[in-house]
Image (cartoon, rainbow, N blue to C red):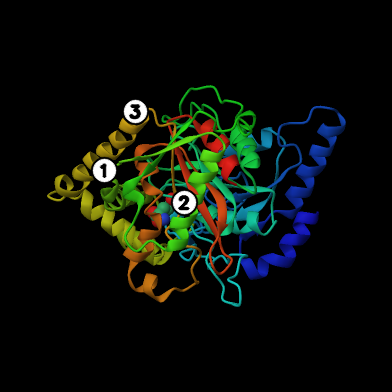
Amino acid sequence: SAYLEAIEAANPALNAYVDITAEKAIDMAKQSDERLSAGNAGALEGVPLGIKDLFATKGVHTQAASHILDRFQPEYESTVTANLWRDGAVMLGKLNMDEFAMGSSNETSYYGPVVNPWRAENSNANLVPGGSSGGSASAVSAWLCSAATATDTGGSIRQPAALTGTVGIKPTYGRCSRWGVVAFASSLDQAGPIARTVEDAAIMLGSMSGFDAKDSTSVDLAVPDFAAAVERGVKGLTIGVPDEYRLDGMPAEIEALWRRGVEWLEAEGATVRSISLPHTKYALPAYYIVAPAEASSNLARYDGVKYGLRVSGKDITDMYELSRAEGFGREVKRRVMIGTYVLSAGYYDAYYVRAQKVRTLIKRDFETVFADGVDAILTPATPSAAFGIGDEAMKADPVKMYLNDIFTVTVNMAGLPGIAVPAGKDGAGLPLGLQLIGKPFDEETLFAAGRVIE
Ligand code: GLN
């Protein structure tokens, strides 16, 4: 009830929730009370969560913040959310996001932008919470839920976490089932939590993870006790700092934060050394070929027949065209056009196949440093703190917006786990985050090292 009251008070200004499932929440909480008094509480018993609108929730609107999925009510529950309810969690509602998870500022949502609860000192300007999981990050940061589900295709868990002073982890590809998560770019998409602390993130991920026969890319590995790894420390670990992430014109505050991160890890007994990931500079361009290519294919299913919005036309082709024209926003249309272009005959080899080759090289860069004794990699999470809603430069040039993902996309391209942890503030008092990248299925080291930094 306290959370529902907080949502009612703060959500009109933040726009973090797009659907508040108050009755369901009270009902689930009562069932939790019963299980608690019967002495069979789950790992998340009674914990109130917000759910990103990308997760299918049975009988509750699931629209991926898109007009084209108007009033879509899934007949089934995503595996990740089903796992959370199995462990006793309570659903407060569905959270705003960029349309189909495409964006880095949560301004592409059909429901309008999400507002970051943080403001720069001496300013009243509304800032973005990052994206695409901006509703999740804003809600956690403003205490409108204990933790939230989120998804990350190129940084959408870690970047908004960094911009709101929260913790976000994208686990290894295959750790969380994608079943019932609206698809953006299937070879990159992973679910994960945004939470207030590293420990909370570890507990959440423990519940969300696990093998699922319904997702052919789900990996059949036991889920470790992530929470037990949190206080493990970093003594004896080798942490790599990649030269290629030191960008020209990087704000001095981010450099300083990164240096402080190194010092904290060293003070706790880790060895920190420079490493090279030589193909880093190709990650962003390759991502913006692979992700739109997969998106154009995944989004072909929204044709006005099977889901949500239908705009009638003079014949069926006309109906398809009118429904897609009205149902998709600008950024989604841009991705579908780029994706269709790079997959078309004559361009496929030059763009798509080439990007896939680059992807392999990026993956090998990581394999080489891990084989050479590096346990985890420390980088900034984002190239800047939160920026203003409606930023003119980013509106005028979509590539400027894409640059927000510069430190995060490599991790998705390589399928690795990455965590963003709050590490300090900029000169205006806005949160900044650091990122740790781990070996495949070694989220435990990220929780241990993340705990040292937070
Ligand atoms: N910002 C990136 C994009 O727009 C990543 C989005 C995501 O991780 N879902 O594609």
**Circle 2 residue:** 258
What's the residue at 55%, 32% (across, down)? 209
Tell me which label, 1 or 2, sits earlier in the chain: 2
- 3 vs 1, front mark: 3
What's the residue at 34%, 64% (across, down)? 249
Q: Is residue 330 left or right of residue 8?
A: left
Vertical position of residue 125 compared to residue 417: above or below: below
SS assignment at label 2 = helix
SS assignment at label 1 = loop
- How far apart are the two marked residues, 2 and 3, measured between alpha carbons? 22 Å
**Circle 1 residue:** 278
On the image, the x and y values in percent for residue 194 come to 58, 47
- 1 vs 2, front mark: 2
**Circle 3 residue:** 372
Q: In this view of the protein, which residue sits in the foreground, 396 or 305? A: 396
Question: Answer yes or no: do the residues labelled 1 and 2 have beta carbons within 8 Å?
Answer: no
As shown in the figure, which amino acid type bears the numbered disc 1?
Pro
On the image, the x and y values in percent for residue 274 come to 36, 41
Residue 79 can be seen, yes or no? no
As shown in the figure, which amino acid type bears the numbered disc 3?
Asp
Q: Quadrant of the N terminus?
A: bottom right
